[in-house]
Amino acid sequence: MTAMNIPAEQCHKGENPQALELKILCVDDEKNVLKSLQRLLRMPHYAVSTALSAQQGFELLRKNHFDIVICDMRMPEINGAEFLGQVATQYPNSHRILLTGYSDIESTIAAVNRGRISRYIQKPWNNEELLHTVRAVDERIRLEKSNKLLQKQIEKQNTKLKDLNNSLENKVALRTQQVTRAMNRLKTANRVISSNLNSTIRSFYNLISLHPHLSGEQAIKISELCALFHPYINQQSITCKELKLSGLLSQLGLLSAPESVVQCPINEQSAEQKSIYLEYISKTRAALSPATSLKRVADNIHYQYVPFSESARNKEGVPTGAQALSIARDYIFAIEGRLYRTKMSSNGAIEYLTSHAGHLYDPRLIAILPQLIKELGHTPISSNEQILGINRLKAGMQLSRDVFNGKALLLLPEGHILTKESIKRLANFAKTEHTPLELFVFSEGKKS
């Protein structure tokens, strides 16, 4: 196979020599796809190289530094998941984007887990979505470099401040103002970088919602019920957001499980099916391990099927968040027909869970379940949040709740800081889908 290779020195370059050049490598075995990517990414400060095979891609990576590697899932030598996995190991500072079809869902999961991709985009791709992703990476790289520069400046300024004489009060005040402004810029930059965690959560949840035998709507209900338990558990051990995420991602490990296991109601599974089911549930911890800030979420999901009676005997103890998750999960599963094929009424589900209190479930949490069920789906607006239509949104506002579309796909996660671009995308979505959107945002000065 002949590779079409555009060396770094022959790439499209910006007209401004001082502009920061973003180096992009596109790998695909189809020339037409590579040409399309070249045309799309023909920007003043983008330098685009292409390779028709994984081998040619590695040759370019050995010779040049690339900020972004865009790879197709399906290639003849190795698939995109395997290729990005090797790129992640050898070039961890690169940002990796996978182009994938819907039929490649299991391979996409492998890329998320092993390749630690920055983003996956379904084919045929949307030009605006792909360009937005590349621009976001470009902005992040610039912010990271700005961070380092600001940190050095702050260190120098602090050193000078220590040496100033008391008679130089005006200069001290001026320097302090400069440091404060620099720190505010640094906080803003760090907040943008931390938003990548939200992107990872959104990708994981949307994989669950797109799975033919799992339900994003059920995940949302489990998440909401978990959040209602938060005031009644040890709040120092877990935040409300972590408890909500535990419910939202509780079925993540089942994405690659056999259909026969996922489709069968849990309490009607054979011993072999139950063993396989629990094995795949436990894989969630490995999937979330790169995101160290989600450790407590991963632990809750990992221990969610440990019976309460067994956890009481465990010296290390099972997180109370896992016990709340097990009750929320089985209540929703009972009324949705995933515990048994026959759907239970709300009262029937409460009765069933109550009969297993002390063995499967924490009796203290079971006792408050009926009260929480009445609140489910009717979470009142908090004193620190407000509901706004799209035309009243402003850049810098922070979402206080997740934003889903009508198909239970996560559009923007709780905690997202709105930008002009994200507001524009929401407005376009509402216009295209003919769906009016009202968003929960934190009141000014009361962000979490």
Image (cartoon, grey):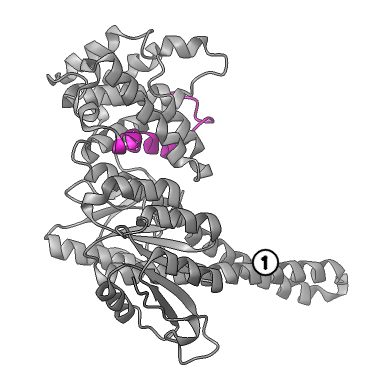
Residue 287 magenta = no
Name the residue that disc number 1 marks: 151
- In the rendered structure, which segment of residues is drawn in magenta? 232-256
Residue in view at x 17 percent, y 27 percent: 336
Give the image quarter of residue 37: bottom left
Residue extending furthest bottom?
15
Residue 106 makes an appearance in the image: yes
Our reading of the magenta stretch's main secondary structure is helix
Residue 123's x, y, as percent? Answer: 23, 62
Front-most of 170 and 198? 198
Residue 442 makes an appearance in the image: no
Residue in view at x 38 percent, y 83 percent: 43
On screen, residue 126 above or below 359: below
Front-most of 60 and 95? 60
Residue in view at x 36 percent, y 78 percent: 4
Residue extending furthest front?
1
Dot 1 crowding, Cα within 10 Å, few <14, some 14–19, many 20+: some
Q: Quadrant of the N terminus?
A: bottom left
Residue 247 magenta = yes
At label 1, the amino acid type is Gln
Residue 305's x, y, as percent? Answer: 38, 21
Front-most of 36 and 41? 36
On screen, residue 446 above or below 128: above
Give the image quarter of residue 329: top left
